[in-house]
Image (cartoon, rainbow, N blue to C red):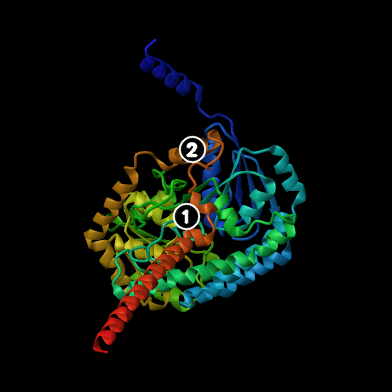
Amino acid sequence: MPEGREGLILILLLVLSIQPLEGAKILTICLVGGSHYLLMDDISRIFQDNGHDVRMFHQIGNGSLPGYKLPSTPYPVSTYSLDEKYLKEYDEFFMEYQKDFFMGKVGIQPFFSLMNIFANQCQASMNQTDILDFLKQEKYDIAIIDAFNPCTFFVSEKLGIPYIAVFPGIFANSLSIGLPNSPAYLPAFASQFTDRMNFLQRVQNTLMYIGSYVVEGKIQAIFDSISERHFPDGFRPSLRDLYQKAELWIYNVDFSIEFARPLLPHVQCFSGLRAKPANQVSQDVEDFIAESGDSGFIVVTMGSMISTIPIMDLVKEMNLAFANILQKVIWRYNASHWQEDLKLAPNVRLMDWVNQNDLLGHPKIRLLVTHGGMNSLNEAVYHGVPVLGIPLFGDQFDNLVRIKAKLMGEYIPPLEIKSKSFADLIRKIVENKSYKTSAMKQSVIMRSRPFPPDRQLLGWVEHIIQSGGGGHLRPYSYQLPWYQYWLLDVISFISICVAGIVYLIVKVIRGLIYLMFSNRKQKQS
């Protein structure tokens, strides 16, 4: 039999031996509420609907969704509730800083405070021995975890399950997982720079990159106590170790929004899991929208966990601005908290909860006014809707810088909102068709990807399960000591060699010079 034919038969047999993956056991872990839960719920449903056996481990109590009634899930959920102490701690944190966010008081301290709360809550999560023992006995093939809360890594490690990390936003933790980073064109997290920086911005960006290592070190130190208390001597993983142990990293971003950058093979980006073709809105909402005529309507939401605005002066300015535009306004705002002596603008409708995706897919939508969360921006891009951002905290500033850089919107800090200028900015974005054109361009980029995000997610996770992990995708750099990674040993060796050569050259030259002068003196004598 010819050698080529034998090779062809072997390849055919190999292809036939690789059967589609069916019925894998998958554990999803979500220890944060709000939009994080909504994203992990979507992921869980995708795998459940495609023949896999899914269970979610869900910590309930913090980050609940005001005005939103959780639907029943097609997959089982193992839940536990935080005790009153931790719930009170979280609520006090959120209420303390929420007003500061609207007052423009943004810094790194709130993030450290949040990580400390997560670390305290993680002790409670790791103490759920009955649930953890049950989950461990189930022997899951893979865990898919919300990587925003570092505790999910420790839970997965405690269960002994290989895991895939889903990060809900931009590459804020790129240094921790060893992504290639260049301060020349990749803006550091919280820098609010684009990928096109001038000299002074590149200087500042470089310094912020250096500072990011310090910040990351403090965050990892916060969780050292988890490793010390819940893992035996000799096997106490650091948070960095667990980051690099992930079989796959999935970022909820799309390059229709994010700036182009190099990635590693085990890092994948596919956002828009929550963005999908719109369903019909309810009849009462449709009747309200119909009253707008050709002017259309705008949607105002400030995030899944913020149902009211704690600064009444800001509420009054926004309400007055809405009263002076032609569009109808659907404003997600808890009506029971509306100030009685403040007359609601006649073109505004308050709703405790909105199905944002369906509203953004409505033909009469003109603008999304948003805090700048990634899920909201993905939906806006998917439906080609211009954006007016009011950033409050976290990645929202950087997210909205990207929206502005893509020419599909503007943003304004909450303290700068005055009724006239705010109304003028709304009219500018709605009436200047370039914003809509840019939004539609980004929508085409997102929608025309070779594979939809749910198929990408399925394909990659099934690939990791079938191939026995993602070791073939992770770079060897993860195993290198820091001094080898930064080539300090090579640099030291080359420096010593160069110094030695220079030393020898100098010695030879000095010797020759000495001989020349010695011969001259002898001749003169």
Residue 205 visible in this rendered orientation of the protein: no
Asked if residue 23 lies left or right of residue 199, the reply is right
Q: Compare residues 101 and 465 and report the one nearer the observer.
A: 465
The N terminus: image quadrant: top left
Please give the residue where the numbered disc 1 appears in the rendered image. Answer: 354
The quadrant holding residue 126 is bottom right
Is disc 1 surrounded by few (<14), some (14 to 19) or many (20+) residues within 10 Å?
many
* Element under disc 2: helix
The quadrant holding residue 189 is bottom left
Residue drawn at 41 percent across, 57 percent down:
180
Please give the residue where the numbered disc 2 appears in the rendered image. Answer: 458
Q: Position of residue 210 (x, y in %)?
A: 46, 71
Residue drawn at 49 percent across, 53 percent down:
477
Mark 2: which amino acid?
A: Leu
* Element under disc 1: loop
Numbered circle sitting on residue 334:
none
Asked if residue 161 lies left or right of residue 198, the reply is right
Count of labels in the image: 2
Mark 1: which amino acid?
A: Val
Asked if residue 270 lies left or right of residue 226, the reply is left
Q: Compare residues 472 and 341 and report the one nearer the observer.
A: 472
Q: Position of residue 409 (x, y in %)?
A: 31, 63
Mark found first going from the N terminus, 2 or 1 = 1
Disc 2 from disc 1: Cα separation: 29 Å
Q: Position of residue 26 (x, y in %)?
A: 60, 39
Is disc 2 surrounded by few (<14), some (14 to 19) or many (20+) residues within 10 Å?
some
Residue drawn at 74 percent across, 60 percent down:
229
Residue 444 visible in this rendered orientation of the protein: yes
The quadrant holding residue 111 is bottom right
